Image (cartoon, helix red, strand yellow):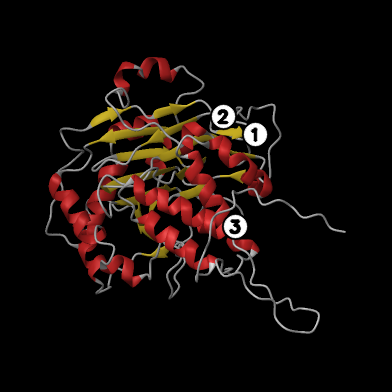
Amino acid sequence: MQQHREVPYPVMTTIKTATAQDLCTQARSIWLEASSIEELDQVEQLYRQALNSKQQSNKTTHDGRPLKKKKKRTAIAELSAVEYRKAGERLSLLYCQSGRAQKAKKGLEYLGFTCRLSQQVLDYPLPSKHNGKSRKRTATKQSHSKSAPPCVIYDNFLYDEELEHLKAIFGDPKASYWSSHSYQVEPPSPYFSYVLPLLPKSNRRSKSFIDQLVRKVWRLPQLNSKFPDLSHATHVEMWAHNRPHASGHQMHFDSDDEGRGGVRNPIISTILYISADGGGPSLVTNQRLDSSNLAHKGWLAHPKTKRLVAFDGRVLHGVVPGKGFSRQKGGRRVTLMFAFWKHIKVRDEATPGSSRPFPIESEDQWAAGLLDDSLTLKTGASADMKDQDPIEIDAVYENLDGRHWTRHNDMPDYEQVFQGF
């Protein structure tokens, strides 16, 4: 006889007239717009109820009559295996991000995980006056350190007029850039990006807003000093995201055509923060595709308006879901990304997808805004630009007991690593 496997979540009280999937949908909807601890408590309660739902019984008595239902309990439809896993992962993330990682252990084991992103990552330190000190003070030390970060942060990179132009194009989640591509956060839209050649100033199209902005990043002296190969770039790939606070982006390597036909990395990737009213930090690690172990060092860069983050295009990175609730109701994390390539294949296809040619002749509002040549960008970064240190993380991964996942541990399967998003 098959032994019943105990469900690793506490049994809840009476549940009436709802499906378990309805409860999960409601929980996620509240979570994405949460602005109080009370709403997060409600999210937790809904997930716990859904995870402990019972299948409606079709059993009958010995004479064929249906069994009578209990008066004070109405069973709800049980989650499918996929739905159960997703709900379990989300409840575990809530636990991990609120100092209760040990409470998530049993559930994560039940779901087949062997390690997870560390507490330093999922329950990340918030920005403070003690973080983000000028890199100038530590540049000499870092230049001789094996653990020098593969990333840099520049605050106040954009001028106000540049920021406002970008906000007009990307800031509103209903703007034409998002609607033209049927962009959605959950379930996530398929990846799409555009490629532009890096044009000399003498080219007639070099006066467009997007070309001026790209050149502003590409020619930044501090960036070229950190990444000397940047000068060999011939094309830039552009994409963007507009996400609510609790939405993250799984750990991944940037690659031409999402790795189809083999992983080919850019020279560097960059992130421009257009809006920072919500969202978690970007996480950059020292893990590369050919690494035999999980990353043991990581660096966090929090969202901050006008901030530019750049990192080695070969390293594993992602976006941590925002913990708690956003600083403002409906706060979004809006970012514009540039990846600089020495070689990249442009794929001229009709539908949105990876590395499409930039629509030069398009009448779409978003494309026209980026091709606008009425705004002349000032040469170089803002006069107020400052180098900032990322927040260093000395444990990117941990086992489910909270011990550091070291170089002596085996490389786990990707599906065995809990990311929480």
Residue 296, labelled with which disc? 2
- Above or below — where is 306 with respect to 55? above
Describe the element under mark 2 as helix, strand or loop: loop
| Residue toward you, 227 or 384 | 384
Q: Residue furthest right?
A: 1
Seen at 63% across and 64% down, the residue is 54
Residue 343 visible to an observer of this rendering: no
Q: Residue furthest front?
A: 71
The residue carrying pointer 3 sits among few (fewer than 14), some (14 to 19) or many (20 or more) residues within 10 Å by Cα, namely many
Going by the image, does 253 lie left or right of 170? right
- Whichever of callouts 1 and 3 sits on the residue coming sooner in the sequence is 3
User: Residue 9 versus residue 412: which sits nearer the camera?
Assistant: 9
Q: Which residue is mark 1?
A: 293
Numbered badge on residue 395: none
At label 2, which amino acid type do we have?
A: His
Q: How many marks?
A: 3
Please state which of the two labelled residues, at mark 1 or mark 3, is closer to the viewer.
3
The residue at 60%/27% (across/down) is 404
Q: Which mark is residue 52?
A: 3
What residue sits 34% from the left and 64% below the top?
A: 358
Return the disc, 3 or 2, that comes first in the chain's sequence: 3
